[in-house]
Image (cartoon, helix red, strand yellow):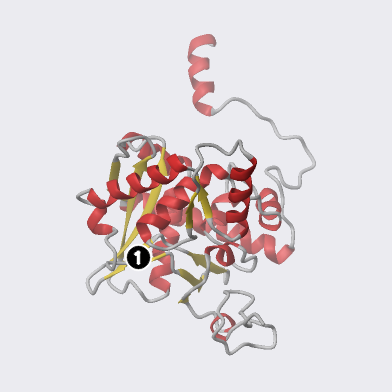
């Protein structure tokens, strides 16, 4: 028989209330959950994570967030490589299975791939397996990334839960790597990318709102009591193209503050939508048709060029 688990955070230790949640969640207490799988973490529909908060803000909207939450997409093969690198570098994650095939064109290759997925493993073709090993080795040899992610120096993918004091929303986060020291706590986010140049990394932070995710990690770690003297956030960006170059950077304080402000707005939206059980699209309720035009920068440029 499967163990009873808190329907909110997944904790199996109990004790549980009549509603099926543990006392920590009932009291809104922060903490982390040992042994919670990534699948169980992502399947949680009663708390909100960084990806959910980012999805509530433009270019996303509450309606799309709610649909995607209730109808999660199937795993995409293009994410397997990144997940595999995480597992190999961090020592935490699904088992990697090397398949002795160069493609998935044969029936046997497809059957072994599907069987691995069914077992919760990450299937990798021969060249993909070799690439993952080379990428992990490049991280280990890097002068900054290697020491940051050295085995035994941190805790990989620990699920943290807490209650946002301003909205009462129950939040969760799962930092890739957490180093807890008496003087400072370091949060390390490992990203695989097509371009690990500093300029491209900077653009990725804006495009994917990584600064928003980083701010939530810091707030969660502090709420759970693991960063009494403050927390610092580091990104380890690695190119998926040989020789698998690595860029390590610490997030600027100002960008972290912006990310936190974005989270605060998203949390208010989430709390309001949850209370009303209404998840509007980009427009929301209106009796008129709003106007639309080009982005402001394009309007200014074309105004100068054509409306002199």
The percent coordinates of residue 53 (x first, y second) are: 55, 55
Nearest the camera: 226 or 136?
136
Q: Is residue 301 visible?
A: yes
The percent coordinates of residue 212 (x first, y second) are: 45, 53
Nearest the camera: 164 or 293?
164
Q: Is residue 250 above or below residue 245?
A: below
Q: Is residue 143 above or below residue 219?
A: above
Quarter of the image where the N terminus is located = bottom right
Q: For numbered disc 1, what is the local secondary structure?
A: strand
Name which residue lies at 46% across and 76% down. 34
The percent coordinates of residue 179 (x first, y second) are: 30, 66
Left-right relation of 215 to 302: left
Q: Residue furthest right?
A: 287
Nearest the camera: 19 or 82?
82
Q: Is residue 308 visible?
A: no
Name which residue lies at 49% across and 26% down. 297
Which residue carries the number 1 mark? 178
Q: Total of numbered circles in the picture?
A: 1
Name which residue lies at 50% across and 21% down. 300
Q: Is residue 53 above or below residue 296?
A: below
Left-right relation of 166 to 211: right
Label 1 Cα crowd, 10 Å radius (few <14 / some 14-19 / many 20+): many
The percent coordinates of residue 151 (x first, y second) are: 29, 64
Name which residue lies at 36% across and 62% down. 177
């Amino acid at each position: 028989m499967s163990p009873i688990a808190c329907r909110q955070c997944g904790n199996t230790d109990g004790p549980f209330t009549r509603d099926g949640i543990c006392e920590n969640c009932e009291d809104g207490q922060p903490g982390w959950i040992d042994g919670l799988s990534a699948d169980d973490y992502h399947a949680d529909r009663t708390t909100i994570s960084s990806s959910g908060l980012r999805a509530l803000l433009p270019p996303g909207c509450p309606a799309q967030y709610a649909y995607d939450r209730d109808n999660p997409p199937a795993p995409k093969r293009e994410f397997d490589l990144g997940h595999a690198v995480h597992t190999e570098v961090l020592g935490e994650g699904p088992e990697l299975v090397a398949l002795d095939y160069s493609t998935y064109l044969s029936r046997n290759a497809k059957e072994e791939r599907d069987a691995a997925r069914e077992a919760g493993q990450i299937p990798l073709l021969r060249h993909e397996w070799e690439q993952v090993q080379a990428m992990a080795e490049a991280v280990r040899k890097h002068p900054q990334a290697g020491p940051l992610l050295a085995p035994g120096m941190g805790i990989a993918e620990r699920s943290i839960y807490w209650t946002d004091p301003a909205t009462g929303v129950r939040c969760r986060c799962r930092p890739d790597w957490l180093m807890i020291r008496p003087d400072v706590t370091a949060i390390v986010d490992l990203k695989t990318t097509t371009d690990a140049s500093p300029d491209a990394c900077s653009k990725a932070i804006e495009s994917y709102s990584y600064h928003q995710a980083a701010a939530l990690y810091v707030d969660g770690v502090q709420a759970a009591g693991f960063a009494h003297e403050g927390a610092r956030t580091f990104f380890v960006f690695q190119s998926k193209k040989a020789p698998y170059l690595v860029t390590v950077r610490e997030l600027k304080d100002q960008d972290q503050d912006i990310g936190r402000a974005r989270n605060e707005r998203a949390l208010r939206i989430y709390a309001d939508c949850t209370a009303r059980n209404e998840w509007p699209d980009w427009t929301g309720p209106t009796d008129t048709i709003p106007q639309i035009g080009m982005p402001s920068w394009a309007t200014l440029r074309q105004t100068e060029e054509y409306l002199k």
